[in-house]
Image (cartoon, helix red, strand yellow):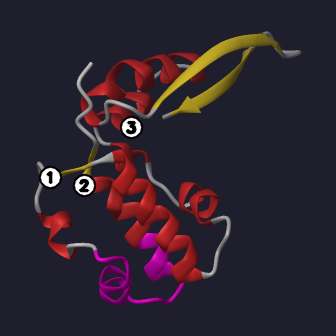
Amino acid sequence: MKNHGVAASFLLPVMRTIVRKGLRWDSFCMMAAIDANLLHQEDARIPEVEYERIVQAAAAFTGDDAFGLHQGQGMNPSDLGVPGYVMLHSKTLGKALEAYQTYNLIVCSNFNATSRQTGVDGRGNRLFASFFRA
């Protein structure tokens, strides 16, 4: 499969996390050599290695070694685009993970998740383990 990178919209959660920490997005873009206009180009894509570099730069800029974790805590399902909305409308977590696996390839050709059922809880709900890979 051809690698198309990630949607530039993946920068929105990075921007929100930086701004939530009281820092300036434009200062970060200058420091990390990012074209801030990428956010306004709806079809723009970023190579995965560039996105990873940006997230690492954000961790350094904010002084937050757990930047990715904190970014994830503040994400909205809409940040994932089509896969996020499909996940929101899934009846179960298992179906949401299946939807993510299926539709994530629309947004990103290399970051995906796999999951497997690990058991059943006391109420009969299936338990899953998820693994993200690049």
Horizontal side of residue 45 vs 76, given as left or right: left
In this picture, is 68 found above or below 103? below
Tell me the residue at 37%/77% (across/down).
32
Magenta stretch contains residue 29:
yes
Q: Nearer the viewer, residue 71 or 88?
A: 71
Q: Which mark is residue 44?
A: 1
- Image marks 2 and 1: residues in contact by CB distance under 8 Å: yes
Q: Quadrant of residue 64?
A: bottom right
**Mark nearer the viewer, 3 or 2:** 2
Cα–Cα span, label 3 and label 2: 16 Å
Q: Where's the N terminus, which quadrant?
A: top left
Q: Which residue is mark 2?
A: 8
Start and end of the magenta stretch? 16-33
Q: In percent of the image, x 35 and y 32: which residue is there?
A: 83
Q: Which residue is mark 3?
A: 84
Say if 77 sits above or below 114 in the image.
below
**Circle nearer the viewer, 1 or 3:** 1
Q: Secondary structure at mark 3?
A: helix
Q: How many marks?
A: 3
- Which mark is first along the chain, 2 or 3? 2
Above or below — where is 36 with respect to 74? below
Q: Residue at x 48, y 55 (%)?
A: 75
Mark 1 vs mark 3: which is more N-terminal? 1
Assign a secondary structure to mark 2.
helix
